[in-house]
Image: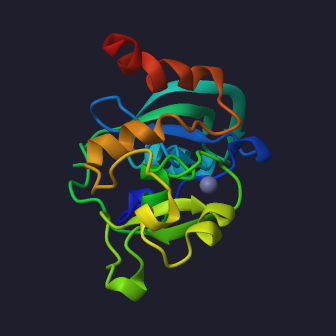
Amino acid sequence: MDGDFRSTFVREPGSLKHHPALVLNADYRPLSYYPLSLWPWQEAVKAAFLDRVDIVAEYDQVVRSPSHEIRIPSVVVLKDYVKPQKRVAFTRFNLFLRDEFSCQYCGSRGDLTFDHVVPRARGGVTSWENVVAACARCNLHKGSKSLRQAGMALRKTPKRPGAEELRNTGRKFPPNYLHESWIDFLYWDAELEA
Ligand SMILES: [Zn+2]
């Protein structure tokens, strides 16, 4: 578990019978919302033995080795604070997440592609400000026309998202399975803001 905490999360907790543990930063906020920061139980148990995390909540199930017995952690908190990344990488995933996985022309959520607002053929660049999520239908309709020529409008002005902004967007996409012990740590700050 040295190195990149962010790349090793369980992606489909509901499909696993592996008792994933929610991983909280030292400030008790999840390390990541999307994907939700979940470790396979083996990682959580190892981290607990190495004294890198405190166990906040547990499953009923127990794992045994010849010398030890431990209840499987369901929530762990890192002892050392991991600084969140400030800069948001310009990746396909982050761009889709910024646009909440919806077409920026019609709002549909199926069959998503990328659209250059100012078409590449007209000198449009590949940037946060000029690329949006678009459904295949809108993309086809727009073709290499400008917005005005195509008679289309963007739902919002595309721009580079801040790390905190993207993190909050990620909170709108919880995985299809949430263990009850995780809920307090996923939504308490959301309720305070409401
Ligand atoms: Zn569309």
Q: Establish if 126 lies above or below 43.
A: below
Which residue corresponds to the image point at 46% horizontal and 67% vertical from the top-left? Answer: 149
Q: Nearer the viewer, residue 178 or 71?
A: 178
Q: Position of residue 35 (x, y in %)?
A: 52, 49
**Residue 192: % across, % down:** 33, 11
Q: Residue at x 33, y 50 (%)?
A: 157
Query: x, y (%) of residue 30?
Result: 41, 36
Q: Is 102 positioned to the left or the right of 166 in the image? A: right
How many callouts does the rendering have? 0
Instruction: From the viewer's side, name the closer residue of 115 and 100.
Output: 115
Q: Quadrant of residue 137?
A: bottom right
Residue 126 falls in which quadrant of the image? Answer: bottom left
Please indicate whether residue 182 sits to the left or right of residue 166 in the image. Answer: right
Q: Is residue 126 above or below residue 139?
A: below
- Whether residue 53 is visible to the viewer of this picture, yes or no, is no
- Front residue of 10/96: it is 96
- At 58% from the left and 31% from the top, the residue drawn is 74
- The residue depicted at 51 percent of the width and 46 percent of the height is 100
Question: Residue 188 location, x and y as percent?
Answer: 41, 16
Residue 140 in which image quadrant: bottom right
Q: Quadrant of the N terminus?
A: bottom left
The answer to whether any part of residue 125 appears in the image is yes
